Image: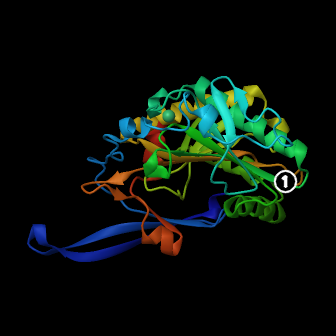
Amino acid sequence: MKNFFEKRIVESSMLDFSNNFTEICIPVEIRRDRLIKRVSRVMRFRLRGLEGFRNAGLIEKSKKNCPFCPENIEKSTPKFCAALIPEGRIRFGEATVLPNAFPYSKYCGVTVFSKSHFMSLEDFSPEILFNALKASLIFIERVRCQDDQVTHASINWNYMPGAGGGLIHPHLQAVVSPRPTHFQDRLIEASAEYRRSQNRNCWADLVAYEKSEGERYLFQQDEVEFLAAFSPKGMIGEIVAVFTGKTGLKDLSDAVVNSFAAGLARVIRGLKKFNVNSLNMSLLISLREEDELWIQARIIPRMALPPWGTSDVNYFEKGHDEVIVILPPEELALALRTTE
Ligand SMILES: [Zn+2]
C-alpha cells in the first residue's frame, strides 16, 4: 500500500515584506493517492481563527414553513408511489423517509432525522444516527426488492447550508440507481485493479497499512475502522470509515450499523475542536455480489475561511480536481484519535 501513496514537496520563494524583504521559502506538499487516483496539496495554515459557517438568524427564519417540521411533514412533503412503498413514507424510531422532491436519481429518498428543526453537531447521538441510517437502509432494501436493475446505493448527508444543505431541518439522502456514481465507480475500479496487480483486497491492506503506520489511524469501533484519508477531499481533511469485510446490504446488521453510528458520533465530537459546524458524509454500498468494494463512509468536514467566510471549495477543486488542504491529515487524526 505504501507504494500507492506519494508525497512531493515543492517550495515557492518570495521576498518577505514583513522582514525587510528577505527571501523565504514556503513549502507545498503535493500528495497523490494512486489507489483512488486523487491529488491534494497540503500547506500549513494558521488554524487559529478558523470558523464555522455563520448561521445567525438562519435557524429561526427557516423554521417558518419548514416542510420537515412535525406540523407540516404530513401535508407538505411527497409520498412514495404505492407500487414502491404502499404506506407512502417509511418510519423508524423518530426518523421518516419520504421521496426527495428534487430527485438526483430514479430512486432518491430523504430521511428526516427527528422532529427537531435544528440540531447542532453534538446533538447527533449514536441512537439518532442509527435510526436515520436504519430508516435509509430499509428504503434501499425496499427499492432493491422492487427493482432488480438497481446495483448501487448510498446514504448521504449535507449538514447545513455551508455543506450544500438546502434545508436546515437535519436530513439524510439515500440514492439507489442502476449505475454507480463516478466516485463509487472509481473505488470499484480501484478494488479490481488492486486485485489484478496484487491479488489482494485493497481495503484490507489499506486498514492494515494505516493501523501499522499509526499516524493517520483513528480508532476501531467493533467491525468498523476509522482513519484519516492520505489525500483528502476536504480542506481540513477527510475521515474514512471502512466496514471490515462488509460488501453488501446483507452484511449491514443492526450491530454493524450501531458501530458505525457510535464511531460517527465520536468523529463529530472530535471535529468540534476545529469549530466545524457543517459536513458532508457519503456511505457507499454496492448491491452487486461481484464488486470487491468494502462498504465505506467518507466524512468531509466543511469550513469557512476568515475573515470573509470564504468557501473551502475553490478553482483548484472545481477546475483541476485537486484539493487544497490546510490541516495535515496526520494532525486531524491525532485530534480525533484523542477524543473520547
Ligand atoms: Zn423543521
Task: Examine the image and state in which quarter residue 74 appears.
Answer: top right
The foreground one among 66 and 199 is 66
Q: Can residue 326 be seen in this view?
A: yes
Is residue 334 toward the left or the right of residue 198 in the image?
Answer: left
Q: Can residue 221 be seen in this view?
A: no
Q: Compared with residue 293, is residue 321 higher up or lower down, i.e. above or below?
A: below
Q: In which quarter of the image is the N terminus?
A: bottom right
Is residue 156 toward the left or the right of residue 255 in the image?
Answer: left
Q: Compared with residue 186, is residue 301 higher up or lower down, i.e. above or below?
A: above
Residue highlighted by disc 1 = 150
| Residue type indicated by callout 1 | Val
Residue shown at the point (81%, 38%) measured from the top left: 85
Task: Examine the image and state in which quarter residue 257 appears.
Answer: top right
The foreground one among 336 and 9 is 336
x and y, in percent, of residue 27 in the image: 35, 67
x and y, in percent, of residue 20 in the image: 8, 72
x and y, in percent, of residue 134 in the image: 71, 31
Residue shown at the point (64%, 63%) measured from the top left: 4
